[in-house]
Image: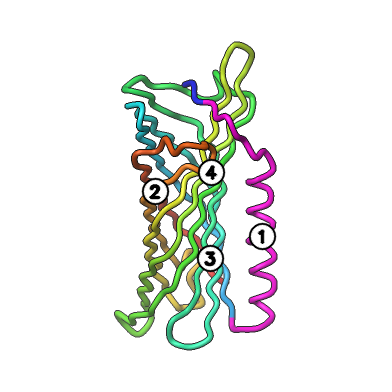
Amino acid sequence: MNRESNRIPQPLLKQTLLLIFLVCLILSTQVQAGHGLAPALSLMRINSTDGDRVALLSPGLNYSADFRIKKPHFIISTTIVLPLWATQNGKRYTNPNFYDFYLGTDLFLGIALDYDVQDHFRLSPAVGYHLNGILMRGKPRYLDFYSLTSGIGLHVLATDRRDSRLLNYLFLSLGIDFLDFLYEENRLRTGISLCLGVGHRF
């Protein structure tokens, strides 16, 4: 897998995570807030204007924050992922064989509405902004891989509101991206990110 950009903001992932943390901290002091942690599985597919097709499969850890003021509410969902497996143009790779460092993040910011399905079960669909970033440092003789794509995000949160449940929520997040920020001329034809997780809200 070889894909290297000509304009790489190396601290960008760290800055994004710091910004998310600060926004969550500020909002949680102003409005009613809920938080959740969940192990997750992420699949990202990149189709470039050059005809390359790259897919990354990653385990991850999701943090979600839900800030309620009135009936519509604001959702932040971010997943830290380890892109361990990949395919490029049909060829399969195990990323640790080619990269010394591999890390990414999948971010969703959106507005949601609640729908009570039963007394203890709530469904919260949301629409908003999606951002996906991948950073992988190649071993000697291999190029680095960078990606920072953005577009439209759809997010569905299913919550079991009974306090006795250890695993009390499930989320499914879909991102459809059209822009890669790491290139002066956009080389992304389409990007699709799918993330699924089950965890605990508190």
Q: What element carries label 2?
A: strand
Chain-order first, disc 2 or disc 1: 1
Tag 1: amino acid: Leu
Front-most of residues 48 and 193: 48
Task: Say above or below: 39 vs 56.
Answer: below
Sort mark 2 into few (<14), some (14-19) or many (20+) by Cα contacts within 10 Å: many
Disc on res. 19? 1
Task: Say above or below: 91 vs 131.
Answer: above
Chain-order first, disc 4 or disc 3: 3
Query: How far apart are the alpha carbons under marks 2 and 3?
Result: 18 Å
Disc on res. 91? none
Part of the protein shown in magenta: 4-32
Tell whether label 4 touches label 1 (CB within 8 Å).
Answer: no
**Residue 199: percent from left, percent from top:** 49, 60
Chain-order first, disc 2 or disc 4: 4
Tell whether label 3 touches label 2 (CB within 8 Å).
Answer: no
Task: Say above or below: 147 vs 166.
Answer: above
**Residue 116: percent from left, percent from top:** 33, 82
Badge count: 4
Chain-order first, disc 1 or disc 4: 1
Name the residue located 63 percent from the left edge and 53 percent from the top edge.
Answer: 16
Disc on res. 133? 4
Front-most of residues 49 and 13: 49
Tag 3: amino acid: Ile
Image-quadrant location for residue 159: bottom left
Name the residue located 57 percent from the left edge and 48 percent from the top edge.
Answer: 80
